[in-house]
Amino acid sequence: MPPAAMTLSPNQVADLLGQDRAVMIDIREPDEFARRHIKGARSQPLSALSAVPLNVPHGKTVVFTCKSGMRTAANCERLVSGLDRAAFLLEGGVDGWAAAGLPVTENRKAPLEMMRQVQIGAGSLVLLGVALGYGVHPVFFGLSGAVGAGLLMAGVTGFCGLARLLNLAPWNRAAGT
C-alpha cells in the first residue's frame, strides 16, 4: 500500500505534467469541472470514485485536485486506497493553480455549479421572506423558516429538493443530459 499522499505546489505539479510523468485527477462533480478545470486534468468525481477505475498508465504519478484542496485533503485516505503507486494532492486545488499564474480552462457558458445555484436560490428566498415579513405581513417569515428547514434536511439526508428543482431549469438541461 502506498504511503499517504503528500501535497505538492502548483509549480511542482506543472513540472511533473510538463515532463509527462503525472496524471491529474479532478475529483469535483461534472458541473464544477465543466465550468473551470486545469487543462489536461481528467474528471473522476469523488461520488463515483469507487465505481470507475482510475486507469493510470504505469510509471505515472497520480495527482488529485479539487477546487481549493480541502476536498482532496479530507478524502486523502479514500483517494489513495487501492493505488499501487505514490499519489499527491495539488496544494490549493484549481484555485491555487490559477493563483500561481498557471493556465486553467474556463467555460463561462457552462451553468454555475449546482451548489452555487442552491446557495443563490436559498439566500434569495431567505432575504425575500425577511423583507416580506417586515414589509408586508409576518406570515412571510415562514418562507425563511421553510428554506432553513429544507437546508437542514438536505444536510442531514443528502437530498436537496432545491437542487433537484434547479436541475430542471432550462440553463441546466444541456449539462444534465
Image (spheres, rainbow, N blue to C red):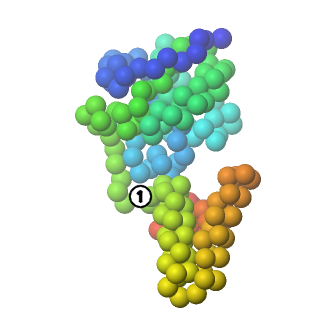
Residue at the left extreme? 101
49 relative position to 115: left or right: right
Image quadrant holding the C terminus, namely: bottom right
144 relative position to 123: left or right: right
x 48%, y 37%: residue: 66
Residue 116 in the image, given as x and y percentages of width and height: 49, 57
94 relative position to 98: left or right: right
For this rendering, which residue is in front, 168 or 163? Answer: 163
Residue at the right extreme? 157
Instruction: Tell me the SS state at disc 1.
Output: loop
Q: Quadrant of residue 41?
A: top left
Task: Tell me the amino acid under the disc marked 1.
Answer: Ala
Query: Could one spot residue 133 in this view of the protein?
Result: yes
For this rendering, which residue is in front, 84 or 100? Answer: 100
Above or below: residue 70 compared with residue 139? above
Residue 91 in the image, given as x and y percentages of width and height: 42, 27
- What residue did someone put label 1 on? 110
Query: Could one spot residue 57 in this view of the protein?
Result: no
Image quadrant holding the N terminus, namely: top right
x 53%, y 23%: residue: 56
Residue 27 in the image, given as x and y percentages of width and height: 54, 37
Residue 11 in the image, given as x and y percentages of width and height: 31, 23
x 25%, y 34%: residue: 101
Above or below: residue 140 compared with residue 159? below
Q: Residues within 10 Å of mark 1 (few under 14, many from 20)?
A: some
Above or below: residue 144 compared with residue 116? below
Please give the count of numbered marks on the rendered protein: 1
